[in-house]
Image: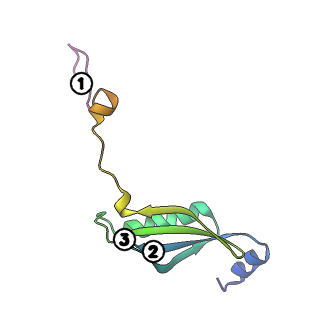
């Protein structure tokens, strides 16, 4: 954030977005800023890339990521990922009344 572009954006009062790695626990531990961007969508892309690169199998090596919007002295968490919040797939047959992943074919026609 010491670049000329960073200084100009701060002078223009445009918010920045920090990507923080979080270690779950009680209390959770902020492992620090992994990236800073000037656009929310870029921040989400960077966060997803970080999760994919650091934990490609989804085993929980990255237990959490937060995107924090920084606008002057104000800080607000605008996006959050926690590995422990992932839920198993629901029973699709129970939810929809049919199996939405099943291929249907009319009798007498080849699928």
Q: Earlier in the sequence, mark 1 or mark 3?
A: 3
First-in-chain label (2 vs 3): 2
- The answer to whether the residues at label 2 and label 3 have Cβ atoms under 8 Å apart is yes
Q: Secondary structure at mark 1?
A: loop
Q: Secondary structure at mark 3?
A: loop
Magenta stretch, overall SS: loop
44 lies above or below 75: above
- Which numbered marker is on residue 21? 2
Q: Residues within 10 Å of mark 3 (few under 14, many from 20)?
A: many
Coordinates of residue 86 in the picture (x, y in percent): 35, 56
The magenta stretch spans which residues?
A: 100-111
Q: Residue at x 53, y 76 (%)?
A: 35
Q: Residue at x 44, y 66 (%)?
A: 49
Q: Position of residue 1 (x, y in %)?
A: 64, 82
Residue where numbered disc 3 is placed = 62
Position above or below: 83 against 4: above
Between residues 87 and 62, which one lies in front from this camera angle? 87
Separation (CA) of disc 2 from disc 3: 8 Å
Which label was assigned to residue 111? Answer: 1
> Residue 57, how many percent across, how many down?
28, 64
Asked if residue 50 lies in the magenta stretch, the reply is no
In the structure shown, which secondary structural element does the residue marked by tag 2 occupy?
strand
Location of residue 103 (image quadrant) = top left
* Mark 1 or mark 2, earlier in chain: 2
Residue 55 drawn above or below residue 97: below
Q: Which dot, 1 or 2, sits closer to the camera?
A: 2
Residue 60 seen in the figure: yes
Q: Quadrant of residue 84?
A: bottom left
């Amino acid at each position: 954030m010491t670049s000329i572009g960073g200084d100009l954006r701060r002078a223009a009062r445009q918010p920045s977005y920090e990507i923080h790695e979080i270690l779950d626990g009680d209390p959770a531990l902020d492992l620090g800023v992994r990236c800073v961007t000037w656009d929310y969508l870029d921040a989400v892309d960077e966060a997803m890339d970080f999760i994919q690169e650091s934990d490609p199998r989804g085993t929980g090596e990255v237990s959490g990521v937060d995107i924090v919007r920084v606008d002057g002295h104000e800080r607000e968490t605008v996006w959050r990922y926690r590995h422990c919040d992932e839920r198993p797939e629901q029973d699709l047959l129970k939810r929809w009344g049919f199996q939405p992943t099943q291929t249907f074919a009319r009798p007498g026609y080849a699928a």
